[in-house]
Amino acid sequence: EVQLQQSGAELVKPGASVKLSCKTSGYTFSNYYMSWLKQMPGQNIEWIGNIYGGNGGTGYNQKFKGKATLTVDKSSSTAYMDLSSLTSEDSAVYFCARLSSYHVFDYWGQGVMVTVSS
Amino acid sequence: DIQMTQSPASLSASLGETVSIECLASEGISNDLAWYQQKSGKSPQLLIYAASRLQDGVPSRFSGSGSGTRYSLKISGMQPEDEADYFCQQSYKYPYTFGAGTKLELK
């Protein structure tokens, strides 16, 4: 069974950074891209970027370049996303999701709420 | 970026009623269109990909159709468990973009 388990909720101060994790199981991590997505309360879903589990190759939504950095640890089948210089606009739920061969998101993590507040 | 305009923003349906949700892309997306269901407080779940292909495990009352710039999701026979938000997503061009969502409630 494919599972994506994300780290817990974060409360961070403005200007700080946060690193989110997404630990996977039930499939060959190095054969798939992992995507990260953002959903603000009651709002649309935004695609942040993809990272390939095999070699760490990345592709980003231009809107999130400089804000998000994606990495992977193949040894633990875990994907990470660093968010930097956080502002209130970064308060949202962040999801990791596996990217299928049709470039759709076929398995999702449970999501993690990031709250930016002093 | 490709804009995805979803309609209606909300609707309510009676048990057993057939429901349709539409998505209009700002340019042709060659059937690279997916539909997701998101229940309150949960992560989205893939229902339909490639415009009309049913994801494994999804009930057959869900179906997708369309071409070019216009796509639709149909639920043939509303069930209580179908109460959720529904989103479309294009994967034709980067960045992938989503519609704003349709809130479906049981009347």
Image (cartoon, coloured by chain):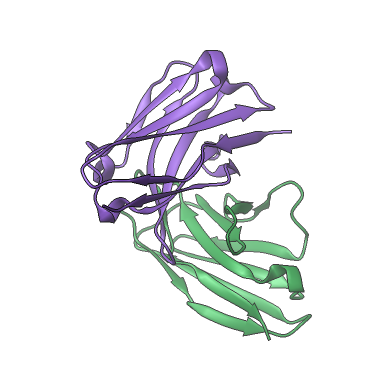
Chain colours: A purple, B green
**Image quadrant where residue B59 sits:** bottom right
Q: Relative to A101, does residue A13 appear above or below in the rendering?
A: below
Q: Position of residue B14 (x, y in %)?
A: 72, 85
The front one of A59 and B63 is A59
Query: Which residue is farthest top?
Result: A75
Horizontal side of residue B72 vs A15, given as left or right: right
Horizontal side of residue B48 vs A75, given as left or right: right
Q: Check the picture and name the quadrant holding the C terminus of chain B.
A: bottom right
- Residue A118 shows in the view: yes
Q: Position of residue A26 (x, y in %)?
A: 69, 27
Horizontal side of residue B56 vs A52, given as left or right: right
The front one of A104 and A108 is A108
- Residue A100 shows in the view: no
Q: Relative to B107, does residue B43 appear above or below in the rendering?
A: above
**Image quadrant where residue A3 sits:** top right
Q: Position of residue A62 (x, y in %)?
A: 25, 42
The front one of A9 and B90 is A9
Question: What is the tally of numbered marks visible in this picture?
Answer: 0
Q: Relative to B67, does residue A34 appear above or below in the rendering?
A: above
> Residue at image x 48%, y 75%?
B7
> Residue at image x 34%, y 61%?
B3
Query: Which residue is farthest front?
Result: A118
Q: Position of residue A5 (x, y in %)?
A: 59, 36
> Residue at image x 77%, y 82%?
B15
> Residue at image x 45%, y 22%?
A72
Q: Relative to B16, does residue B50 appear above or below in the rendering?
A: above
